[in-house]
Image: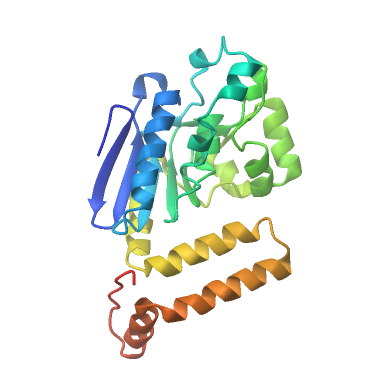
Amino acid sequence: MSDEWVLVERPEPHVTILRLNRPRVRNALNCAMRDALASHCRAIAADDSVRVVILTGGPEHFAAGADLSEFVNRSAADILRDKSWDNWRAIANLPQPVIAAVNGFCLGGGLELAMGADIIIAGENAKLGQPEVRVGIMPGAGGTQRLARAVGKFAAMRMVLTGAMISGTEAKALGLASQVVADDKVMEHALEMAREMACLPPLALQSAKQAILMGETASLEQGLYMERKAFEVLFATRDKQEGMEAFLAKRQADFSGE
């Protein structure tokens, strides 16, 4: 269910949209919004009817960063005592594939949130960046780690150490965006991709997602082993049987998620 901070939409039976909802401040991420987003993600993670999630903001802004009004007077001890750290990982912890649909400003905590998704579809003129150094701090929710893994050391250093913003087009060239489209086509493309994935076997999607994520920090041999085990387990699913029989019979498969 929607709340003040995050709008929840169900445009398709198996697709859920999470829409950040603080348009007056360009969706700056305050504590209440992060709490709400984490709560929705936990509910979605337990909902087998949801096969794909789209995370978005608005046509003019994804999220302009953390709400600095909540940080300006906080001390190091306050940050150390902060128990909401896991809220930043809410999107990354979802078992379902997550598409971030990015328009406008996607900065600081907003970019860190988007990088927790599995696929980023960006508008050509979106503005992505980690500008934290310009206000005396640094990224603290994955901006140094996920960004470097996505674009490499030297591009990440430029973005983090200068606070420079890049366009959606440049993000695609660097490997930060999966796809770049016209600004007014971002949600259309995200929904099209979500519909396509929602017709696929959800257990296979989730297993493939986890294999890629776990392999990022594993050796090649460990990653190959994890991949093989996940592959083997899928042979115990009904959807494996349905998918192969449908292919051989030249008919449309009807996947049940079992």
The residue furthest bottom is: 249
Closer to us: 224 or 186: 224
Q: Is residue 125 visible?
A: no
Residue 80, percent from left and from top: 62, 24
Left or right relative to 144: residue 193: left
Corner quadrant of residue 134:
top right
Q: Residue furthest right?
A: 154
Q: Is residue 89 above or below residue 27?
A: below
> Looking at the picture, does residue 36 appear above or below residue 209?
above
Give the image quarter of residue 30. Answer: top left
Q: Is residue 204 left or right of residue 173?
A: left
Q: Residue at x 52, y 29 (%)?
A: 83
143 vs 58, nearest the viewer = 143
Relative depth, front residue between 117 and 45: 45
Residue under the point 23% across and 57% down = 13
Q: Find residue 103 and report its image quarter.
A: top left
User: How far across and down, in percent of the image, does residue 112 sit?
Assistant: 55, 37
Horizontally, residue 82 falls left or right of residue 10, namely: right
Screen quadrant of the N terminus? top left
Q: Position of residue 76 (x, y in %)?
A: 65, 17
The vertical placement of 223 against 188, above or below, is below
- Would residue 122 be found to the left or right of residue 201 on screen? right
Q: Quadrant of the C terminus?
A: bottom left
- The color scheme shown is rainbow
Closer-to-camera residue (221/161): 221
How many marks are shown on the rendered structure? 0
Residue 40 spot, x, y in % from top left: 35, 41
Q: Which residue is situated farthest in the top direction here?
A: 73
Q: Residue at x 29, y 27 (%)?
A: 4
Q: Is residue 235 visible?
A: yes
